[in-house]
Image (cartoon, coloured by chain):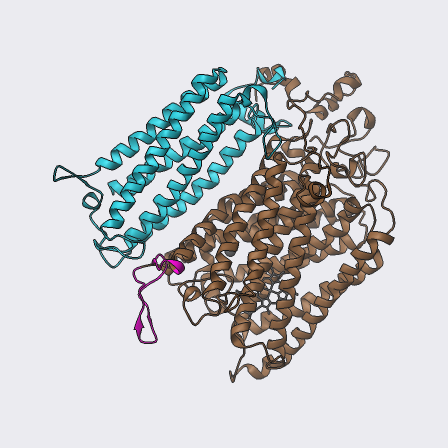
Chain colours: A cyan, B brown
Amino acid sequence: MSDNSLNNLPGGFKGMSHDMGSDQTAFKGAQWGKVMMWIFLLSDTFIFSCFLISYMKGRTSTVVDWPNTSEVFSLHVGGVPVPLLLIAIMTFVLITSSGTMALAVKYGYERNRKMCGWLILATAIGGLTFVGMQVFEWSKLIHEGVRPWENPFGAKQFGSFFFMITGFHGTHVSIGVIFLFIYARKVFRGDFDNAKRGFFTTMKSDYVAIEILGLYWHFVDLVWVFIFAFFYLW
Amino acid sequence: MSDEYNQKNTPLEAQSSETMTDISGTTSKDIDYVRPAELPEQDLYHGHSFITKWVFCQDAKVIGVQYFLTAVFTGIVGLVLSWLMRLQLGYPDLVPFITAEHYYQFVTMHGMIMVVYFLTALFLGGFGNYLIPLMVGARDMVFPYVNMVSFWMFFIAVCVLMASFFVPGGPTGAGWTLYPPQAILPGTPGSNMGIILMLASLSLFVIGFTMGGLNYIITILQARTRGMTLMRMPLTIWGIFTATALAMLAFPALLVSCIMMTLDKMLETSFFMPAIIQAGEVLDYGGGSPVLFQHLFWFFGHPEVYIVALPAFGIVSDLISVHARKNIFGYRMMVWAIVGIGGLSFFVWAHHMYVSGMNPWFGFFFATTTLIIAVPTALKVYNWIITLFRANIRMNTVMLFCLGFIVTFVNGGITGIFLGNVAVDIPLSDTYFVIAHFHMVMGVAPLMVIMGAVYHWFPLVTGRMLSEKLGKWHFWFTFLGAYSIYFPMHYLGFIGVPRRYFEMYDSPYVASATGMNEFITVAALIVGFAQFIFIYNIVTSLSIGKPAGKNPWKANSLEWLTPEVPPAHGNWGEKLPVIHRWPYDFNVPGAKEDYITQTTPPSEVMSAEVEKT
Ligand code: HEM
Ligand SMILES: [Cu+2]
């Protein structure tokens, strides 16, 4: 942003009413893409909320009992069932990938191309590991006979909601991973330093794109925390 | 705000007129001050070939016209379906191919097309795309590419919807509310491919709309021109903005219910399906909740009503102000009413479910919230009327449609108060009273605005005026005709004629309803055909209409102030416009002309007593 009048804006609550009352932009200094991502995420929050509220409603009103989740989701290590093991690892991996993403954004703004690129790759691999473990969990459950339409351990809505919601979240993660790989390539190629024009959009690339992707990635993580709590801890 | 703060930051404010009050001391340079540009120039993609200019075009104005034409096309399909239904109701068995199954399919497709694919797409996709960048003074939408994809998503959604007419079993006949379990069970027409295509089409629509909606919101929030504060935007933009925000938060519920119902249909999950015995056979379903679907659907469905109504409110306010040559009464009140109605509309959804078997206390709560919405709504109606009071009204076609809107909207609003009360709604629900109510309030009223808006902005889009003479004929046919159709329906509802019924058979009230049904059918056919006057008017005016020139209505808002008319790609030529005032400075005491455009600097109208905006 070229204009130096953005440097001495009032802060706090006053600042907010000032910005809302002023011309041109309501969020001073925020790029279009960033605002877009925030509003998209707000909309996406409503999608996940609808899913989770439906799940709560479904779970509390089934006629058949809900399966005991700490048994269904446990892993057998040396013959002993360990509840929450897999899911703890998955959650750990995903949260860690949020950390690497945040660092990637930082190095991106510092124009440290190498570090930024590697950290994005690390994030992508974290995401991939997460999806991989989710595939493992799905196949384990399917192997035990859980299906979207049936469930040997109790209410069949368990399978339906589990596959639908984790599937929807997993799709988000996978889309994120694809973009992470694309962006890693762009970073290494130097697109963001040279403001290369996008293939489809013909718009100039900018490092802010990494921050925007970061917002998405943190959101996907945050949603996972809720899914984790509602499915595995309830 | 403290004084100290004010002084420190005055250069940041876009309040040129603030300094107006002490004209004596300040030089004209100070009065005209508008803070410098914050944003770099938007770089636009200019199409070169026919395809990039007219088909996969990234210019919001072309996209707007594309949305408009596609929506009107589906609207005509919806209109033809309504004729077929009316023929059956007025003259049972006259048309042999209208069987009960077909009737249900027509009702469903008519309702869904009109609400979602016609009105929503027309207001937000059509008017939104065309007007937002022009009215806020941007070169284009902020993400032109995404905007283009948005239209093509919508186009595919329409194609999928239309395809459902041609699949085995035909389109779904579940009613536009698509309630499970019946929507996906055999026995309902189109319960196989029909419903699947409907759900797929809705999902595509939501995805496409989200892309467009992000554009509209961010263009309005982040891409306004210098001097354009939020409180200087035309109410049209406020209406479209709030409606888009509602859509971004309401469509998720629709998407989720579509996904869940698709799974219920295709994978036999039981999200919405209780245990069911059909023809003596126990189905594989069990344990789900049909009422959950209704909650999700109406969490989308009620805001949807306002997604259609709010842009209409906004547009009609601007049309009234321009053609009554008077500022809109209570601009700020109007803005807050729009925003307030939008917010409240998320807390009233279960007034559609009074008879669904939900907890009766819910009905109590939702009746209360519903009636509260009547307050800001009534406020808007008063403000329109006060704007007209002692104004310098031009009785042209646009104004006629605006007046038609106010009358119909008040009519539909009053029946809405009936239906908002649980005790009154229970006998009336699922009767023709409901049909009459929502056709008045969200069928005819927004249509009046759309038509008025077309007469108003046609000169901008094409550079030619529409014929006033044909326009007046069109108005009177439409207005009187629509009343002949829907007014008697209130009575039909009172005597108990149920909605969505194919035939009345030997019901006791048949005798008194027959004549009326015939009358309504004739009126519906006439109104439908009267729309061809409109289409004829548009088509002929394209080539022989009176050339409009610049700003034919002497309006103030930016869309009329482009260097070229019709506006070119990039809208503003070399330099973006700079705004000094709101768009409602009509008949200002002391001004030379009866209007002061938004770009007129204060120094040019020193003696005018303008409002501080
Ligand atoms: C010439 C114009 C129109 C005529 C003659 C007409 C007529 C009808 C008729 C006969 C029905 C079926 C009633 C029943 O059997 O239950 C109906 C339903 C409906 N109409 Fe219209 N209509 C018109 C325009 C519109 C418009 C502009 C809208 C947009 C809001 C609309 C929205 C609906 C809806 C939502 C339903 C309910 C569908 C359902 O029950 O599933 N109609 N209309
Ligand atoms: Cu409602």
x, y (%) of residue A91? 30, 33
Q: Residue at 83% across / 50% down in the picture?
A: B465
| Quadrant housing the N terminus of chain B | top right
Which span of residues is magenta-colored?
A: B265-287
The percent coordinates of residue B134 (x first, y second) are 71, 37
Horizontally, is B174 left or right of B147 in the view? left
Q: Quadrant of residue B326?
A: top right
Residue furthest left in the image: A79
In the rendered view, would you say B203 is above or below B423? above
Give the side of residue B249 with respect to residue B324, left or right: left
> Does any portion of residue B352 appear in the rendered image?
yes
Q: Position of residue B75 (x, y in %)?
A: 64, 59
Write down which quadrant ligand 1 falls in.
bottom right
Does the segment drawn in magenta span residue B282? Answer: yes
Could you say which is closer to the camera, residue B566 or residue A184? Answer: A184
Residue A221 percent location from the top left of the image: 37, 33
